[in-house]
Amino acid sequence: MDTEAFWRVLGAAKDRDKPPDAAVADRLSALRPEEILAFEYEFSRLRDAVHRWDVWAAAYLIGGGCSDDRFSDFTAGLVALGREWYERVAAHPDALAGHPAVRAAAAVGDQDVIFDEDFNFVSCRAYERLTGDTDAFWGASETYIAARTTSADDGNEGDDGGADMGESFDFDDAQQMRLRLPRLTSL
């Protein structure tokens, strides 16, 4: 499954009566186990691509702070928003200030918008439904990823020092935040 196929699966799963994680798990459950592993692989790649300081700063503003675990939930939530919003935010994290849910959440002080812990486990739930095995997904996923990891990737996976997160800055510095994320800061 390439990135295009990933976005097609995600788009086809849009269901207004269900949260994104439930709708996508339903859609994935109709696929073969290998396709679920491929979906997870692409999901991880997309999340890794927005694992940057500027995106983390946006999560920090929206969430009133943001730990490592919360940032994982935030990047999952960005993917769950769909291709259009994901690509906007990947290009300019301040674009989130234009998202209707972010604007509505800012008006009422909701600090959980975009953060989607459940979406982190959508592939696991679908794999479990399909295979009936509650533990098989993690081993199968590791094997799938290892088969696709090149020697150029060695040392980068799971190591913040190996990935280019961009320029680090102090999220508690109001001037820096206004300079880098003016629209989100004003919300």
Image (cartoon, rainbow, N blue to C red):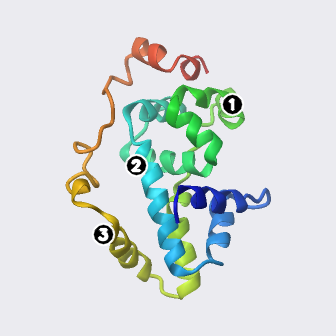
Q: Which residue is mark 2?
A: 48
Residue 162 percent coordinates (x, y): 23, 45
Closer to the chain start, of discs 1 and 2, is 2
18 is higher (above) or lower (below) than 104: below
Q: Which residue is mark 3?
A: 146
Q: Residue, x 49% and y 46% (percent of image)? A: 75
Closer to the chain start, of discs 1 and 3, is 1
- Going by the numbered disc 2, the residue's amino acid type is Asp
**Residue 113 visible in the snapshot:** no
Q: CA distance from mark 2 to mark 3?
A: 16 Å
- Mark 3 closeness class: few <14, some 14–19, many ≥20 residues within 10 Å: few
| CB within 8 Å, label 1 to label 3 | no
Q: Residue, x 61% and y 77% (percent of image)? A: 31
Q: Which residue is mark 1?
A: 108
In this rendering, the label closer to the viewer, 1 or 3: 3
Quadrant in the rendering for residue 89? top right
Closer to the chain start, of discs 2 and 3, is 2
Give the side of residue 58 with respect to residue 143, left or right: right
Q: Which numbered disc covers residue 164?
A: none
Q: Quadrant of the C terminus?
A: top right
Residue 119 percent coordinates (x, y): 55, 58
Residue closest to the far bottom? 132
- Going by the numbered disc 3, the residue's amino acid type is Ala
44 is higher (above) or lower (below) than 85: below
